[in-house]
Amino acid sequence: MTVLPDDGLSLAAEFPDATHEQWQRLVEGVLRKSGKEVSGEAAEDALSTTLEDGLRTRPLYTARDAAPDPGLPGFAPFTRGGRPVGNTPGGWDVRQRHAALSDGSVLADLENGVTSLWLVLGEGGIPVADLGRALDGVYLDLAPVVLDAGADTEAAAHALLKLYEERGVAPEDVRGSLGADPLGYEARTGTPLDFASVAALAARAAAYPGLRTLTVDALPYHEAGGSAAQELGASLATAVAYLRELTEAGLSAEQAAAQLEFRYAATADQFLTIAKLRAARRLWARVAEVCGAPGAGAQVQHAVTSPVMMSRRDPWVNMLRTTVATLAAGVGGADSVTVLPFDHALGLPDAFARRIARNTSTILVEESHLARVVDPAGGSWYVERLTDELAHAAWEFFRSIEQDGGQAAVLRSGRLRDDLARTWEERSAKLAKRREPITGVSEFPFLDEKPVRREPAPEPPSGGLPRVRRDEAYEALRARSDAHLAATGTRPRIFLATLGPAAEHTARASFAANLFQAGGIEPVTGGNFEESGATEAVLCSSDARYAEEAEQAAEALRAAGARQVHLAGRPAEFAGVDRYVFAGCDAVAVLSATLDRMGAS
């Protein structure tokens, strides 16, 4: 009999393995203490979180939640990565975006960690005639260039190819993309573009093996408020439309697929971003298989940190958001990652913001060693299950677009706009109720922050799908407060009337202060109402204290001049209390009405 050496890890070996059912019974006991009488699967459902697209995140995942076999990196269905070595040789391609000429900024990026350039040209960007100036000093055989020129794509592409010829760059050394995206441009502007010039560009690009012609940009759908499944479904429909056009122009399915690069948004919801990128590869592999080109199913992905999540107030928090989003993009297997500078929502980024943006990728690759594992999320029951569920939801959305005539048809009919608008309306309700918090804006705002000023960025193309931001409702409230401050010298104020000892009122006083500051309303504590300069007050204490003192306190506040009395707590029937504020209330509606009464228009 062989005696195994003691590995020091057998401390619990004598205990039997716990079962899923035993865990559920423990959950039942915890929920029972909070007043919820549920059992079995219902107990687990009570702790689940509902996401967009009908997805649900469960509190616990086990082997029973294992998704279909995702395969191996570099092999169909490419869920685990389009290349067998993933990003391990040197990390992902760090791609910096430039939409305006700035002396030395392009070279500074390339000399300090950036490995490719994303140049916005034409309307809302750098003039096409200045492309050579923008790339002055750049070694074009070393730095891939990706164009984003909208209606000026043909002129920009010819200008770039001419630069390659003038500078003697060998065709096999050219890397990047000409960035043609007619349907993406139509989504942005509402203006259709002729595909004939794109097909001609694809034929010319055939002489450059590492140069792609088309970008399937899903950002217009993400920025219009779309969900992850809608973003994926719209990108698939766009890519299929491009495959049809290119094959009709004489390219094979394999050649046509090799002309595409996909661009997706990476958000601070790290698990959903990881799942989205993995699902996108799986879905594209299926499309390539159906088109008879399974060898072209390895999707090339460019991830961009989400503009929707960027806040204008307390923009420094954007550094944290983009760090999480970049981590998710890297773990999800993106080939290229663009980190938008933290001041992106305010205008043109300064040198400091660009440095932080490029260093975000450098730290994750070099210091966290994130790129040393081919598929860091592989094997996670949660990620694998979420990837599978998201892929199915996205496939159904894609099929619905195809059934309605394809991507161009749903853009022109308004159907896609309506779908995205409904999704954004539902999300806006969560934002208004702070079910989806925005740190520094709807949660923990800082009224005394000094505004960050930046030179205005060129106006991007518009006229098509809207561009939304998570902070837009709160930004409008804060702007009203700023206007009141400029006109009167003070912000709108509300008095926090605390009842009882600190142990009873601190939690609700902090809640109320946080809530009203999100609308630019300054909370005043201490002293009495007459000295506060406020016109309204909010009672803060425990439920037991309210039962004893709320009505008397409300009467006293009214006698002192309070026009409205709020109570921090669930709605009840206290005489003299006009409104109740509580976790889950419509904060935007409460704050807007309060500013109306305070004269902050």
Image (cartoon, rainbow, N blue to C red):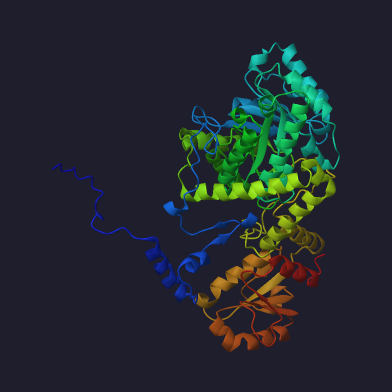
At which x and y percent is residue 103?
Answer: 73, 27
**In-front residue for pair 205/311:** 205
Q: Is residue 377 above or below residue 108?
A: below
Report the number of discs: 0
Left or right placement of residue 575 versus residue 132 in this view? left
Residue 572 makes an appearance in the image: yes
Query: Where's the C terminus, which quadrant?
Result: bottom right
Corner quadrant of residue 546? bottom right
Q: Nearer the viewer, residue 261 or 291?
A: 291
The image shows residue 420 at horizontal and vertical percentages of: 74, 52
Q: Residue furthest left?
A: 1
One can see residue 352 in this view: no
Q: Residue 403's x, y, as percent?
A: 75, 47
Residue 551's image quarter? bottom right
Residue beneath the point at 61% across and 38% down: 286
Residue at 67% x, 12% y is 170
User: Residue at (74%, 24%) from the top-left corner?
Assistant: 134
Give the x, y percent position of residue 346: 73, 45
Compared with 362, 64 (above or below) is below
Which quarter of the rendered picture does the N terminus lie within?
top left
Q: Is residue 561 above or below residue 339?
A: below
